[in-house]
């Protein structure tokens, strides 16, 4: 059934899908301080802390002071969930830039708890607007969460 999405959008995995959710959990579990960074400047601890941000948004724990942004909404919104991988070294929104050292083990445990909470509340999530991008569908929320985690796990070779 075509829901008005392009075939490219239909192929992106969603964190709401049990298989994709299990895959992300397994990959996060494999991540350790010996995982080799493939690109970027974030440390292991900074990366797992950074990955908590979008999950905190969908779980309505923190909006990070993000405001509606018509430039992002107009030009970049669809790149959040389409099938194209994000390029290496993609600029980070200032609210999510990591500047402080982070304890990898502590931050990894926090990320795993957020992913677990996402799974436990998945039937309640994805109905609220994004603070910068406005209304997006539950399907788009799930794809965006998967794509962000996948990007950073690939960054560290898992």
Image: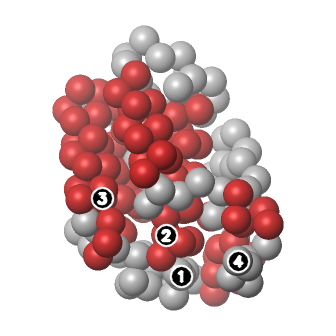
Quadrant occupied by the N terminus: bottom right
Q: Earlier in the sequence, mark 2 or mark 3?
A: 3
Q: Which of pointers 4 and 1 lies earlier in the amino acid sequence?
A: 4
What residue is pinned by disc 3? Answer: 118
Q: Which residue is mark 1?
A: 136
Farthest residue to the right: give it. Answer: 7
Q: Which residue is mark 4?
A: 1
Q: Which residue shows up at 52% across the image and 81% down it?
A: 137
Q: Does residue 67 show up? A: no
Picture disc at residue 141: 2
Colour basis = secondary structure
The residue depicted at 63 percent of the width and 64 percent of the height is: 81
Camera sees residue 135? yes
| Alpha carbons under labels 2 and 1: distance apart | 7 Å
Residue at (43, 51) in percent of width and height: 18
In the image, residue 15 above or below residue 152: below
Characterize the local packing of mark 2: few (<14), some (14-19) or many (20 or more) Cα atoms within 10 angstroms: many
Q: Residue at x 25, y 66 (%)?
A: 121
């Amino acid at each position: 059934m075509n829901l008005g999405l392009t075939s490219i959008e239909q192929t992106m995995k969603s964190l709401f899908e049990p298989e994709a959710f299990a895959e992300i959990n397994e990959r996060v579990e494999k991540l350790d301080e010996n995982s080799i960074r493939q690109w970027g400047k974030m440390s292991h601890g900074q990366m797992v802390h950074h990955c908590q941000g979008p999950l905190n948004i969908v779980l309505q724990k923190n909006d990070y002071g993000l405001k509606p942004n018509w430039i992002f909404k107009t030009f970049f919104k669809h790149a959040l969930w389409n099938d194209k991988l994000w390029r290496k070294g993609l600029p980070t929104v200032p609210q999510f830039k990591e500047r402080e050292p982070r304890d990898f083990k502590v931050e990894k445990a926090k990320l795993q708890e957020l992913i677990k909470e996402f799974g436990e509340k998945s039937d309640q999530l994805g109905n609220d607007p994004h603070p910068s991008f406005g209304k997006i569908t539950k399907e788009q929320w799930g794809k965006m969460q998967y794509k962000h985690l996948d990007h950073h796990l690939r960054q560290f070779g898992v």
